[in-house]
Image (cartoon, helix red, strand yellow):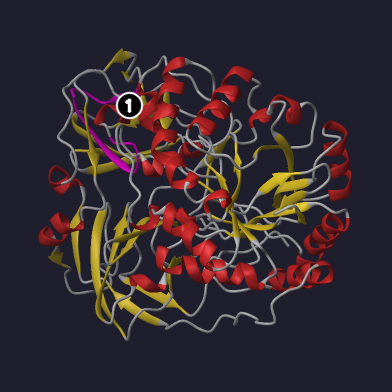
Amino acid sequence: MDTFVIGDRDFLLNDEPFRILSGAIHYFRVHPDLWADRIHKARLMGLNTIETYVPWNEHSPLPGVFDTSGGLDLGLFLDLVAAEGMKAIVRPGPYICAEWDNGGLPAWLYTDPDVGVRSSESGYLAAVDSYFEALLPIVAKRQISCGGPVILVQIENEYGAYGKDKVYLQHLVDLVKREGVDVPLFTCDQPFGTMIEDGSLPGLHKTGTFGSRAVERLAFLRERQPAGPLMCAEFWNGWFDNWGTHHHTTDAAASAAELDALLTAGASVNIYMFHGGTNFGFTNGANDKGIYEPTITSYDYDAPLAEDGHPTAKYFAFRDVIAKHFPVPEEVPAGRTEAPASVVSVETSVPLLDFAPLLGSPPSAPGPVPTTEATGRYRGFYLYEVDIARGGVLSFAEVRDRAQFFLDGVPVGVLSRELRERAITLPGGGRLRVLLEDQGRVNYGERIGEAKGLTGPALLNGVEVQGWQIRHVDAGDLESLRDAAQELPAQGTTEAGVPGPSLSFASFEADGPGDRFLRLDGWTKGVAFINGFNLGRYWSRGPQRTLYVPGPLIRKGANELAVLELHGSATREVRFAAGPDLGPDEK
């Protein structure tokens, strides 16, 4: 039986010193047919371990559900890590941050206002117990002591930046051990102030998270943990992007120099991210430190292995650094080749609001303006409806996150949380419909767990409006909308685009599976689907200009593209580009 323990100065694998050279790959951000490829390329860079978070809300989208099918098959992912001859680190949260919707915490948990967030409150702990009882058997039977790859399990995640509830942390430790986890447990926090002490307990191995000044950060960590191996559990070698900003990049040579300093100091490392992947569907998170900033669809992160799985200059710079300290395989992964480029025109379309009753949940009972939690669905789009007797100024306490207003079918404006807008002028009375987009729940800080939608009271000229109904709009129910779609009229000088909100369809041929890069120049904002798979959000404001289409989604022969456009396009054409375009960087 193999063993893995924490020694006085080193990690010990079967009683021999073992330096962890890990790279982060989030299985839930990568198409499962591509897991083995990404893991293999990590080994070729010289890594010996793969680290992953586990997103509670993705596995449990509704109470009582724990889904491990398809791209959520954590067990298969860990088995593929083992098959590559690598070790694994699992970070189950329950909070993960990760620029992921709600930091991985289920939104349904907070429909009970008494439930705590990342604390020893009893309702929260009961829910965490149920989650870990479903998850941890998958991990426990794949520990190194059972012949599997798992050598470390994390307790919470950068908890010292949030709180210092030691009862909560001890509950997690006891729970993890009770569920059969016997590998070493660790915490990770930023090496600033009292975060490392606040976020950990005696007996838990403390690690740091940083991307620069490695020698200084390691010294700070050593002061607070005199014994045991040094480890940077998140070596930040890139960064994520928000809509409306530039594409963040870091200099490959500078990042490689920091990695060299870290390894020269004798520390272990987990490269965050080795391969970022994609926020498919509606999974992206957001920040709100006074300004709401939703994360884009790509989670490329300027990582060594790009979003589409190809090595970058940073990959080879890191590989050269690792080769100075440890053996590296001779095999070198191939670079990117051009993807098939083509132009496709949408042919049929259906107005979304007219066919909303075909989608999702029935409307709620009339009453004061509700939040989206009233629908029992926690991502995507929602339709509010109410009769307005007269025009005037309609205001809300807050809009979370972006609302399009239609009076008797005519668009009258947009309110955006990002711009802190709360009031709109209605030109008269009639049937008011509001298409509300949840642009991603906050994943860091005090606003985790907040409700979405139009928050009341809703006041028209100072008087509260009653009679609101809300329904969840299941934008992924393509079958219902496909059957209702009508052929677009012949193009002319005034009919070149597609009005929104609408869902439009196109077909295209392919020789077989292979990566594509979908470019929507001339389209404004929405979501795109390939063969029913939600690729994620697009937005003309950028920085992201292409959506990554994983090769396994493409079929030999006929394929379907669907575009949900919220505002309107200046064209009916979409393009498949030869390569990715994540927008201009800050240089």
Q: In this rendering, is residue 544 above or below 211?
A: below
Query: Which residue is at a point 55% across and 68% down the rendered structure image?
Result: 84
- In percent of width and height, residue 228 lies at 80, 41
Q: In the image, 93: left or right of 464?
A: right
Q: In the image, 193: left or right of 567?
A: right
Q: Which residues are magenta?
A: 377-394
Nearer-the-camera pick, 435 or 580: 580
- In percent of width and height, residue 525 lies at 39, 54
- In percent of width and height, residue 73 lies at 39, 54
Q: Which residue is mark 1?
A: 371
| Helix, strand or loop under label 1 | loop
Q: Mark 1: which amino acid? A: Thr
Q: In the image, 182: left or right of 130?
A: right
Nearer-the-camera pick, 350 or 311: 311
Q: In this rendering, is residue 432 above or below 86?
A: above
Query: Looking at the rendering, in which quadrant would you find the C terminus?
Result: bottom right
Query: Which residue is at a point 76% across and 72% down the rendered structure image?
Result: 327
Query: In the image, is residue 500 part of the stretch drawn in magenta?
Result: no
Q: Main secondary structure of the magenta part?
A: strand
Q: In this rendering, is residue 433 above or below 347?
A: above
Residue 5 seen in the current view: yes
